[in-house]
Amino acid sequence: MFLDENHQFKGILHLLLHFGWTWVGLVSMYEEDRDRFIQKRLSMFSERGICFDFIECLPLIMYGNAAAEWIENAGKIFKVIMESTVIAVILSAEIIGLVPLRVMIYFFNYDNIPKERTAKVWIMTAQMEFTSILMQRPLPVDFLHGALSFAIHSKELTGFQQFIQKRNPNLKKDDGFIRDFWKDAFECSFSSNITDENAKRICTGEEKLETLPNSVFDITMNGHSYSVYNAVYAVAHALKAMRSAKLKGRRKMNERKWRRFLQSPWQLHLFLQQVTFNNSAGEQISFGPNGELETGLDIFSWVTFPNKSFLKKQIGKIDPLALSEKLLTISDKEAVWPLMFNQALPLSICNKKCPLGHSKIKVEGKLSCCYNCKLCPDGKTADQLDLDDCFPCPEDQYPNKDKDTCLPKHIIYLTYEEPLGISLAVIVVSFSVISAVVLRIFIKHQDTPIVKANNRNLTYSLLVALLLSFLCTLLFIGQPDQVKCLLRQTAFGIIFSVALSCILGKTIIVVLAFMATKPGSKMRKWVGKRLAISIVLSCSLTQFCICVVWLTISPPFPDSDMHSMAEEIVLQCNEGSTTMFYTMLGFLGFLTAVSFTVAFLARNLPDTFNEAKFITFSMLVFCSVWVSFVPTYLSTKGKYMVAVEIFSILASAAGLLGCIFFPKCYIIVLRPNLNKKEQLMKK
């Protein structure tokens, strides 16, 4: 009477997974058992990542002329098992399955086998039981120290041990079995058979069974005894049910029909399948739809002793009716392992587990349990052993140096507390002061010829725009917020539009002024304040409208860039509508191109109107800065992108300030003798 074999192998599978044993072997008793396992069970293990290094059959012990062949076959199998790196070996056999294994270990030595490979954790199925008849007692049992065995769930029955202890060959003289057992167990002979060569003394019949080591006879209730006990009662209940069954016409069987019924014992199967009863231990006994016993399995850990006795300690159980995650219950602390492992959990794996920060990589031509390890790629981590794949950290974290954990990213932005932010702020203030000083100089000397000759209003407007251009860069420093993001690019765009429109106006007026000096020229009416104001207002209002549409459709907003920097989160302003942002920059580029073109065409005008040369050079500097800005900006990451934009604004504005106004300041402040009308009229 046995449970469904599939339940037992599911239990073994869960046991292997529980201990992390993925590299195992299997030894069966018969070839048909091995073939059935390969066909029906192997895939179940493979799907859960369990690999078998070997699946072998134990050779049945042979005697006489066949002994030599057995030794040869057994030696090969012994070598396969012991030379394997497998530690966990499933032993799926019948009651006598341990006998050939013990004989093999007794006959063959470990001389050519590495010591670390000789210790195996044998996992024995419930069909097996340790038996040791007289001739088998010299065989070793120490290899079972640390083994695990399954057994059909059993429970101690009241009075069972007392029943066993009362067995006596003197009370059952006609029972040949008990007399043979007695002679073998106690190594004695009854007086009627004193010629027995194995007998060391005469059997009295008063020997005590409880004095025998459990390797010879176990008086406790084990799985096999419990199964036999329940089987007898199951058959009794089935016979009773069959006896009470009614035939057609609701008549009970008479003696003749009962005897005829018993001639076909297969008819008892139907009644056996329907049997349900509680045994004397209070447990319900019943059968499944396929006739299998509905019960669980107990798991035992083996401890052996030098006197060849052993102790089996229950450490867990299998409940086939439970959910998959609760099918196995086991206490790791109570398990005993082979002495070589010093009570540490053995690792039955093909190779060492991949360390933290590494993942598995398949080796061509080997089973999936055998693999190499590779370091996680940049941006990924492995915080557990033996991971199939590294995984990326969350967006706000990054892998540490060893790639075995994720660390929080640092939040960065250009601040006033760091050297770069302080340096840029000092430069901004310096250029702003210089612009204010230049403006003060021009206002103070507004009636001098050199100031009057270059359109004072446009000059003042240009200086104010340059001053504001320097100051607007301060919006780029510090933690981005809603106000800064809204004003940052729009202020830059509008202020630079004013500055460029002033330069364009100055250049156009220079050209028109030269053309107006020709006799009969109609350009005189275009030269004046109206034209300058029209140019500045039209260009500035166009840029202002672009910025208003931008802020209306999709305004800039504070954002965080978690991807451009591996270990840092960059706080920045998201430009919102990229189209409008580039439209604003495109308009600045248009003004720059027009101003540069007009200034370049006017560069050869008479020296009286030589401001066009300075404007041409200043626009050349301006264009060079912003052409260099594009590749530099695109190749920079993090807060340094903001620094590059600030530097470009400062450099281009400083270029305009220096090229256009420093030569005039030099004349006004250091060479006032040249700031006269007569000097300007020279050719």
Image (spheres, helix red, strand yellow):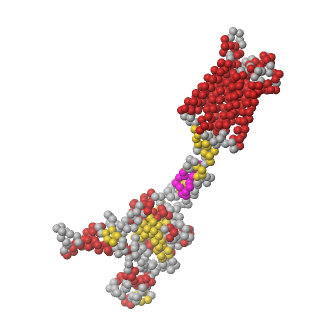
The residue at the point 37 percent across, 82 percent down is 163
Near-viewer residue (416 or 99): 416
Q: Nearer the viewer, residue 460 or 222?
A: 460
Q: How many marks?
A: 0
Residue 467 visible: yes
The picture places residue 602, in percent across and down from the top left corner, at 70, 20
Quarter that holds the N terminus? bottom left
Q: Is residue 178 left or right of residue 624?
A: left
Residue 271 appears left or right of 216: left
Name which quarter of the figure residue 276 lies in.
Answer: bottom left
Q: Is residue 490 magenta?
A: no
**Is 376 in the magenta?**
yes
Residue 534, placed above or below residue 551: above
Which residue range is magenta in the image? 374-391
Residue farthest to the top, as pictured:
520
Quarter-of-image position of residue 417 = top right
Tell me residue 305's x, y (percent): 51, 77
The residue drawn where x is 50% and y is 70% is 335
**Snapshot quadrant of residue 299:** bottom left
Residue that sits furthest to the front in the current view: 444
Q: Could you say which is closer to the camera, residue 576 or residue 563?
A: 576
In this view, the residue in front, 178 or 285, is 285
Q: Residue at x 67, y 27 (%)?
A: 499
Q: Which SS does the magenta portion mostly show? A: loop
Coordinates of residue 241 in the picture (x, y in percent):
26, 71
185 lies left or right of 109: left
Quarter placement of the C terminus? top right
Q: Is residue 29 visible?
A: no
Q: Is residue 144 left or right of residue 481?
A: left
Q: Can you name the residue that lies furthest to the left here?
A: 249
Image position, residue 350 (x, y; %)? 52, 61
| Residue at (64% x, 39% y) in the render | 641
